[in-house]
Amino acid sequence: MRIQKAAEAAGVGPQTLRYYEQRGLLSRVGRQPSGYREYTEEQVRVVRFIRRAQELGFSLDAIGQLLKLRSARAPRQSVRRIAERQLQDLEAKIADLERMREALATLVHACACGLDPECPILEALEARDNGGAR
């Protein structure tokens, strides 16, 4: 199928297909005698796999590893290790976001908006040490 149809089937734009191919995540695409790219159903499945992995927060490098393991029918422990690393990364990001939320909530609560000439939010953002709320 041509690039536009393949992109629609995979739920991405044509540029994304080209980018995945350039990054080596998608195998080289055949060309018709007319020069049009010709994508296979398997290549569309790979793009869907990439998208789902990205939705779970996997980096393109990690996705590349998963694709290699997928095609090699490698031991599933390798896949699990990659997924466990991703889970740890997500948990760390969630903890960071919770700390940011708490700091911002404290700043918003401390803001009197117009009653005080000082602004605790601006002061905290200007603080050299970025220590958060005062």
Image (cartoon, rainbow, N blue to C red):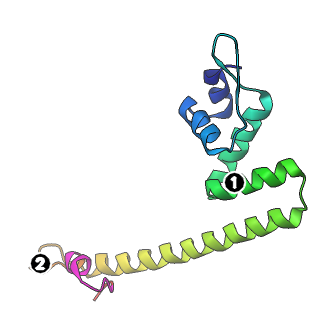
Residue 15 percent across, percent down from the top left: 54, 33
The residue to which callout 1 is attached is 63
Q: Residues within 10 Å of mark 1 (few under 14, many from 20)?
A: many
> Which dot marks residue 25?
none
At numbered mark 1, what does the secondary structure look like: helix, strand or loop?
Answer: helix
* Mark 1 vs mark 2: in front: 1
Q: How many labels sit on residues?
A: 2
Q: Residues within 10 Å of mark 2 (few under 14, many from 20)?
A: few
Q: What kind of residue is marked 1?
A: Ile
The residue to which callout 2 is attached is 115
Residue projecting furthest to the bottom: 134
Residue 97 percent across, percent down from the top left: 48, 72
Residue drawn at (35%, 75%), measured in percent from left and top? 104
Depth check: 28 or 5 in front?
A: 28
Above or below for 73 versus 17: below
Residue drawn at (71%, 20%), measured in percent from left and top? 1
Above or below for 71 versus 44: below
Residue 110 percent across, percent down from the top left: 26, 82
Instruction: Tell me where the magenta segment starts and ends, as one range.
Output: 122-131
Q: Is residue 71 magenta?
A: no
Residue drawn at (20%, 75%), measured in percent from left and top? 122
Q: What kind of residue is marked 2?
A: Leu
Residue 35 percent across, percent down from the top left: 63, 15
At numbered mark 2, what does the secondary structure look like: helix, strand or loop?
Answer: loop
Looking at the rendering, in which quadrant would you find the C terminus? Answer: bottom left
Query: In the image, 40: left or right of 61?
Result: right
Residue drawn at (81%, 62%), measured in percent from left and top? 79
Depth check: 28 or 100 in front?
A: 28
Above or below for 133 versus 10: below
